[in-house]
């Protein structure tokens, strides 16, 4: 019922539907045309618009996770959440309902964007699209559960937006969505080595790489470009394991957080 409520609330706000899907598409068009001349794809003739498609899909998942889980703060302020908490419903059921509802919305929007990319010829039509749909659902669950973890302890939307700007958006920007992740080398400066390690340990990097594998067919774990630059690309198997593990950890953490009493909750 909580998941169904998220769907009803989402489609009763038309501007939210447009913003969650329109803003990433606008970014894709603006950045795709702006960085087209400066982008070097390497061995392939891929344009920046084609390279940026997986990053845009990941951004749609992230934006929807943010917009859907912010309702937790609003529900607590309006008193609805208190009614849910004193009901016979289990805490894990509440976490699952909020996560599944937001993840289903995020999956539908990201799938629509990728189907639109197939329609205009930016993504090839292949049998991987079915597997991509399953992978998108795992990623949507992971990001929405992460949003629940951030939204649950927050007492105001301002604090949630601060956490979003401090953690969630940098995770996306350091995921290889804008530029390829360089492979570590002996001559790499210390600052660049730290940045490369952050990108390599970032769960969003595996989400973006997995979408790129299944949508555009990006290849091996290490890609060497004609200019001599070596890029780090995680394998599809590692993308599955990291994304599924990230979803499981975030779901367990959201359930544990919901078992903790919050300020103002009846004892």
Image (tube, helix red, strand yellow):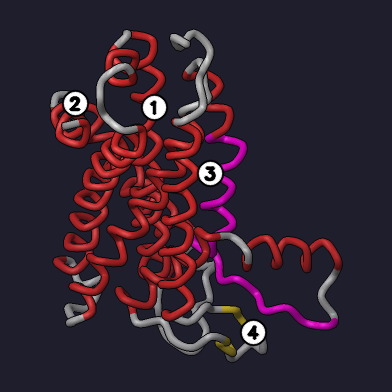
Whole-number angstrom distance, CA of label 3 to CA of label 1: 15 Å
| Image position, residue 78 (x, y; %) | 32, 8
Residue at the (77%, 82%) spot, across then down: 185
| Image position, residue 48 (x, y; %) | 43, 67
| Image position, residue 249 (x, y; %) | 49, 53
Residue at the (24%, 74%) spot, across then down: 131
Range of magenta residues: 164-186
In this view, the residue in front, 130 or 16, is 130
Residue that badge 3 annotates? 169
| Element under disc 3 | helix
Say few, some or many: other residues with alpha carbon within 10 Å of mark 1 (under 14 / 14 to 19 / 20 or more).
Answer: many
Q: Quadrant of the N terminus?
A: top left
Q: Where residue 70 is drawn, which disc sits there?
A: 1
Residue that badge 2 annotates? 9
| Image position, residue 247 (x, y; %) | 42, 55
Say few, some or many: other residues with alpha carbon within 10 Å of mark 2 (under 14 / 14 to 19 / 20 or more).
Answer: some
Whole-number angstrom distance, CA of label 1 to CA of label 4: 40 Å
4 and 3 marks in contact (CB < 8 Å): no
Label 4 or label 3, whichever comes before in sequence order: 3
Whole-number angstrom distance, CA of label 3 to CA of label 2: 24 Å
User: Residue 178: in sight, yes or no?
Assistant: no
Residue that badge 4 annotates? 230
Whole-number angstrom distance, CA of label 1 to CA of label 2: 12 Å
Label 3 or label 1, whichever comes before in sequence order: 1
4 and 2 marks in contact (CB < 8 Å): no
Q: Quadrant of residue 90?
A: top left
Label 4 or label 2, whichever comes before in sequence order: 2
Residue at the (85%, 70%) spot, across then down: 189
Mark 4 or mark 2, whichever is nearer to me:
2
């Amino acid at each position: 019922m909580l998941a169904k409520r998220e769907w009803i609330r989402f489609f009763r706000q038309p501007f939210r539907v447009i913003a969650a899907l329109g803003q990433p598409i606008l970014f894709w068009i603006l950045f795709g045309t702006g960085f087209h001349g400066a982008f070097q794809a390497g061995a392939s003739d891929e344009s920046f618009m084609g390279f940026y498609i997986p990053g845009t899909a990941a951004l749609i998942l992230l934006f929807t996770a943010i917009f859907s889980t912010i309702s937790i703060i609003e529900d607590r302020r309006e008193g609805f959440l208190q009614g849910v908490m004193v009901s016979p419903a289990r805490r894990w059921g509440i976490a699952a309902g909020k996560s599944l509802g937001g993840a289903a919305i995020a999956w539908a929007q990201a799938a629509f964007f990728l189907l639109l990319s197939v329609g205009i010829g930016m993504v090839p039509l292949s049998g991987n699209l079915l597997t991509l749909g399953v992978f998108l659902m795992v990623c949507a669950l992971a990001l929405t559960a992460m949003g629940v973890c951030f939204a649950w302890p927050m007492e105001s939307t301002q604090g949630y937006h601060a956490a979003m700007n401090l953690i969630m958006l940098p995770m996306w920007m350091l995921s290889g969505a804008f530029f390829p992740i360089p492979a570590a080398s002996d001559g790499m400066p210390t600052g660049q080595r730290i940045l490369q390690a952050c990108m390599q340990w970032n769960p969003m990097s595996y989400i973006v790489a997995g979408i790129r594998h299944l949508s555009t067919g990006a290849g091996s774990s290490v890609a060497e470009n004609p200019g001599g630059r070596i890029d780090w690309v995680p394998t599809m198997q590692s993308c599955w394991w990291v994304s599924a593990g990230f979803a499981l950890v975030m779901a367990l953490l959201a359930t544990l957080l919901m078992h903790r009493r919050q300020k103002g909750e009846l004892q």
